[in-house]
Image: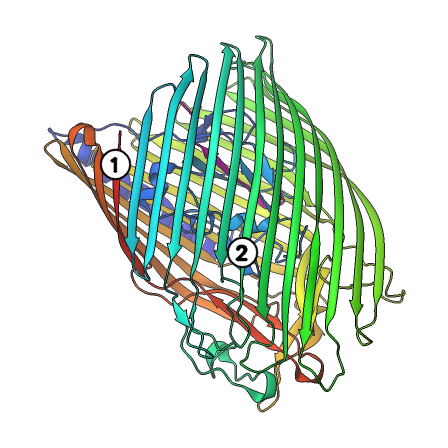
Amino acid sequence: MTGRLRTIVALACTAAMSMATDVVAAENAPDTNVGGLDEVVVSAQRRTESAQDVPISITALSGDQLTARGIDSLLEIAQVTPGLQFQAIGATSVPFLRGVGAAVSSSGAEATVALVVDGVYIAAQPASLMSLNNIDSIEVDKGPQGTLFGRNATGGVIQVRTRRPTQESRLDMTVGYGNYQTVDGSLYGTTGITSTLAADISLSYHDQGDGYGTNLFDGSDVYRGYDYVARTKWLWTPTDSTEITFIGDWEKLRSQTGFATRLPRKGELGLDQRGRLGFQYSGGFYDVDLNFPSGNVTQTRGGSVDFLQRFGVANLRSITAYHTQDVVGRVDFDLTPNDGSHQTFKPTEKTFSEELQLLSPDGSKLSWVGGLYFYQDTSGYDPVFINYAQPNGANLHNTTIESEMKTKSYAAFGQTTIPLPFDSRLTLGVRYTNDKRDFRLNQSAAAAPPATVSQVGSETWPKTTFRAGLDHRFSAQALGYVQVSTGFKSGLFNTQTVQSVPGQPASVPLPVQPEKITAYEVGLKSDYLENRLRFNLAAFYYDYKDQQVNAFIGSTRTLLNAASSKIKGIDFELTGKPSDKMTLSWTGSYLHARYDKFPTAPLFVPVPAPGIGNIATPKDASGNDDVNSPAFTTTLAINYAVPLGTNRIDLNANAYYNSGYFFDFANTRKQGGYTWLNASAKWTFGRNAAYSVTLWGDNLLDREVYSSVNQVGLGPAGLFGGDSITIRPPRTYGVRLGASF
């Protein structure tokens, strides 16, 4: 154990003792009536259990907890989840968990951390931008979940569960207004239709009228957008042992994150960089200077049917789902107000999945699950259109790329937890997956260069993953565990540009091979003082191989299997409830993530002024920090309730600290350490506490934080090149009115 790791463990244990002292003091106070910490139910093992009973590291929060902490999108759950990080790339926001992630964003390139909503795997990466409404709970299951969740869960799984319809009629509404002319509204309603059928509907509206910055080229606003969401769930229970749930969802999102990009200012990130025709950006942190309007509109539609039948000796579950996603995006690729290169692209994705599960009955001492899974996906670009300034020194002509990648995946899996003597349990699981990708791409131009190219390819990747774990109950309140697990991320083809096998004709596409991980973890979950003090701790070590990485070499988005890493660290969670009025929590993560072998990393060296952009040079990055892997993240949160007769005021604050991380393999572009502070005050009043007024603020310290910094190699004839910067929001604040009936 390293010295820094020992220090963090010692601090966590010391804080646990300190908070325990506070809780004990509160317990001895004569007028204190204290309840325990809220229990959050999770489904990390494909069955509903308390998070404290599951022998893996989990961050789990209820919908009310997320609202209180100012978390209203998937991107923001990183502020309350130790070790979780997001990077914006184009229309996607790519998750990294404990240093495991793949900054690969072409259509069909699924994330390394899987997103599962109401039991359905959501493949399309832009879905990670989704807003959070109608949420019952969110859990982040850390480490590879290759047995029960399968492919593309190398880093872990983010599970979102929405509220369940009830027979009792209820209506919740909110409306709000914030700075930057931001209007928000939400509605959730549920009722019984018949004695066996209940339904709900959830609507969400967000419209930001003013941007955080200005496009200096024409004075227009940038970083403005909207997000509209509709979701409905119907629960039919024809018998006491049968449940059928129908879900339909729709979302339309306009965003400029990842698109409204700029070059660095002189000295920013330690760079003195120029773009097309020697342009050097000199505007504000939130501004851009682009002559081609950039942004995207994403529309997602889908539905699922979840069938559950309890037979007594076993439970049978079938989950059938279909989703489509269409994106229209525009990006000024030269990052300047000059004519160089810009792109318009239309990625599409259609996904169908079917999962059958046979589970042990509720309350069974021998817990087991077995299942079959089928997944089918069609994704690609229809099309990508690349425009070059005419004429240009490289004589490049406007180019059109159309592509399609079809995926079929079959899997069989099983896992069991066997009770052992002395309050111990053995968990064993295995999964076999067979992935097949069929690929085609056509590139055409009015005349060469670039050349007209057609590519056709097909690859099959079979893989077996497993989990083995042992846990022990030291007491009714303390669970310890050790485990080893494996996972893999499926291989793929580059759907966005021509990428060929070296030494072969351009018509032979280069497949990117799967990445693989073996993870070792030891942990403790414990509750004390009648569940008023909780302390969880996990230490882990990962052997991460054949990492899929992304780099812009000239105008080409290149996908590579280029690296292996060794990752180790700890997560901790300390939560206390000194009184019914107050809840305190401290969570954190220490991470040591290094490239073990990366001999030919594409490193981007800025061209000295008055040159343009970057030169991409292969160099050895072995020993460097993994990208998007902060050494330390921590969150302090407090909730304090002030009774006012029949009314109440809830005061909440959430302070997140990130020690900083690198955006590039060379470890030269770095986001420095920062603190992100959210707070809110909610007044609940009226008969049955039916009404509320909430004052809220996010990023109250107004920190300037990058969302991403992507390096682009020097384009031919200086048409483009440089570092592409996009940012996170500045300070935002507002008021929200609520009513419940």
Q: Position of residue 157 (x, y in %)?
A: 55, 41
Q: Name the kind of residue labelled 1 in the image.
A: Ala
Residue 25: tell me if it is visible. yes
The residue sitting at 81% across, 58% down in the picture is: 510
Residue 631 percent location from the top left of the image: 48, 58
The amino acid marked with disc number 2 is Val
Q: Identify the residue at image location x=11%, y=29%.
A: 31
- Residue 297, numbered circle: 2
Look at the image and give the residue range highlighted in magenta: 153-166
Q: Which residue is mark 1?
A: 739
Q: Residue furthest front?
A: 446
Taking the image as shown, residue 362 lies to the left or right of residue 566, namely: left
Seen in the picture, residue 46 relative to 9 is either above or below; the reply is: above
Query: 421 or 434, which lies in front?
Result: 434
Residue 646 within the segment the image draws in magenta: no
Question: Which residue appears at 55% of the width and 38% of the height?
Answer: 116
Q: Quadrant of the C terminus?
A: top left
Q: Secondary structure at mark 2?
A: strand
Residue in the image at 39% along x and 65% along y: 211
Q: Earlier in the sequence, mark 2 or mark 1?
A: 2
x and y percent of residue 491 in the render? 74, 49
